[in-house]
Amino acid sequence: MLKLWGRATSQNVQKAMWVIGELGLDHERIDVGGPFGGLDTPEFGAMNPNRRVPVLEHDGAVIWESHAIVRYLAATFGRGTLWAEDPAERSLADRWMDWTATTLQPAFMDIFWGYYRTPEPERDWTIIRRGIDGCAKLYGLLDRHLADQPFVAGEHLTMGDIPIGASLYRYFELDLARPSLPNVEAYYARLQDRPAYRQHVMVPFDELKGRTDP
């Protein structure tokens, strides 16, 4: 059985859980991080020296970093669906996963951490506005990409959709200005039609407001 360490309100944990849900995998999720603590124990440190979630254990392998976990689960259990067999086709998903991590995520964190998770008196609106502008530009790029296809790598859901899709619920729930993004909004609606997305990504995150713990 798969074991996944991490709290349900962690966006990075949600990526792994969404894949697990899409593939219908038998698993156990163990609450650690945030209000549950447990990241500073010797046992957790032995699994992940960074002391962050998620951590996956499967058949003796211990894997950390959310995108590495998504790729592992897709390659192991989702060949032909989440994981394309053809390397060139698979690179379509890979590049959007990497784009999310290296390009979108910093701008999104300027908003989510700078605005939502920072107590109001401590907010730096220079950083928040930078995030709002950056996200508008980047989600606009995604909007243009989705003009002629339903998912980021083509006609069906792949691992490439997981990191991007995991950010959209929070982006659309924040009470901040957003540009018109008709193709992204249609994409988000398609994701909401998926039971695993609703169960594992559309998780209320009120408990995170004004909190800066991991």
Image (spheres, grey):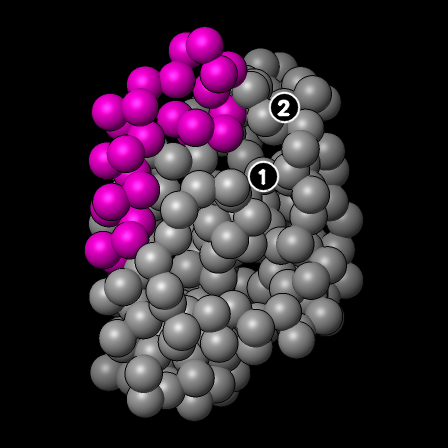
Question: At x 40% / y 46%, what residue is drawn?
Answer: 177
Q: Earlier in the sequence, mark 2 or mark 1?
A: 1
Query: How many numbered markers are drawn?
Result: 2
For the record, the magenta segment spans 113-138
Asked if residue 121 lies in the magenta stretch, the reply is: yes
The Cα–Cα distance between marks 2 and 1, rounded to whole angstroms, is: 9 Å
The residue beneath circle 1 is 10
User: Residue 53's x, y, as percent?
Assistant: 54, 35
User: Which residue is more in the foreground, 162 or 184?
Assistant: 184
Question: At x 28% / y 34%, what residue is drawn?
Answer: 129
The image quadrant that residue 22 belongs to is: bottom right
Magenta stretch secondary structure, dominant: helix
Q: Do the residues labelled 2 and 1 touch (CB within 8 Å)?
A: yes
Asked if residue 50 lies in the magenta stretch, the reply is: no
Q: Is residue 81 visible?
A: yes
Q: What residue type is labelled 1?
A: Ser
The residue beneath circle 2 is 34
* 10 Å crowding of disc 2: few (<14), some (14-19), many (20+): some
Please state if 190 lies on the left or on the right of 127 as rendered.
Answer: right
User: Residue 212's x, y, as percent?
Assistant: 51, 18
Question: At x 56% / y 48%, what residue is drawn?
Answer: 173
User: Which residue is more in the foreground, 17 or 45?
Assistant: 17
Q: Which amino acid does label 2 sit on?
A: Gly
